[in-house]
Image: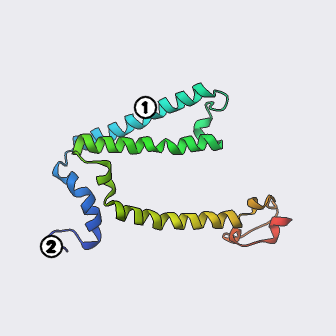
Amino acid sequence: MDGGTMTPRAYLPHDRLVAPARRRPELWRLLAGLMLVATTAFGLNMVLWSLLRGMAPDYWDATAIAGNRPGAMLAVLASFAFVTLGVGMAARALHDRSLLSLIGPVPEALLQFWRVFRLLLALGVLVLLCHPMTWGRRCSRTCRCRAGCCFFPHPCWWS
């Protein structure tokens, strides 16, 4: 325990992020915040997809929202920024907090981002280098590979 509070030391960083919201813990704030995030994300997504369909209707057909093409996948992933915008709007309107106050201290957030990003980057490179489809050859359907063999060159890739 730390300083007479009921918060164990491991939860102090989390407590630092949620403590400002504990001043006004009304249920209506949660529901209003969820509605604000949902309507913001939904509304801006509708605007985005309408604009994209208007610019190139053949490319941005009804199936594009599934991310079945590279440009469509980028648009789907970029549209998650609308959820972040909705969260920032809800934090400002309902708790008088900025979006950065939900992330925490910027230097610490950047350090944590870098730790995760470099591991994901290494994993992406490993998959890119070791995956059989990367070499332009198709894996044989008769090959019975065990789980995990995709990370090592295997003779069935060339059969």
Q: Is residue 30 above or below residue 111?
A: above
- Quadrant, the N terminus: bottom left
Mark positioned earlier in the residue sequence (1 or 2) = 2
Badge 1 crowding class, 10 Å Cα cut-off, few under 14, some 14 to 19, many 20 or more, is few
Residue 77 vs residue 8, the one in the foreground? 77
Marks 2 and 1: in contact by CB < 8 Å? no
At x 19%, y 53%, the residue is: 22
Instruction: Looking at this view, name the residue that lies furthest to the top.
Output: 54
Say which quarter of the image contains residue 159.
Answer: bottom right
Q: Which residue is mark 1?
A: 43
Instruction: Looking at this view, name the residue that lies furthest to the left.
Output: 4
**Residue 3, disc:** 2
**Residue 10, disc:** none
Judge from the rendering whether residue 138 lies leftward or rightward of residue 27; answer left or right.
right
Protein image colouring: rainbow
Residue 29 vs residue 44, the one in the foreground? 44
Marks 1 and 2, how far apart at CA = 45 Å
Q: Secondary structure beneath disc 2? A: loop
Where is residue 53 shown, x and y percent of the image? 59, 28
Judge from the rendering whether residue 102 lies leftward or rightward of residue 68; answer left or right.
left
Amino acid type for the residue under numbered disc 2: Gly
Instruction: Looking at this view, name the residue that lies furthest to the front.
Output: 107
Amino acid type for the residue under numbered disc 1: Gly
Where is residue 131 shown, x and y percent of the image? 71, 64
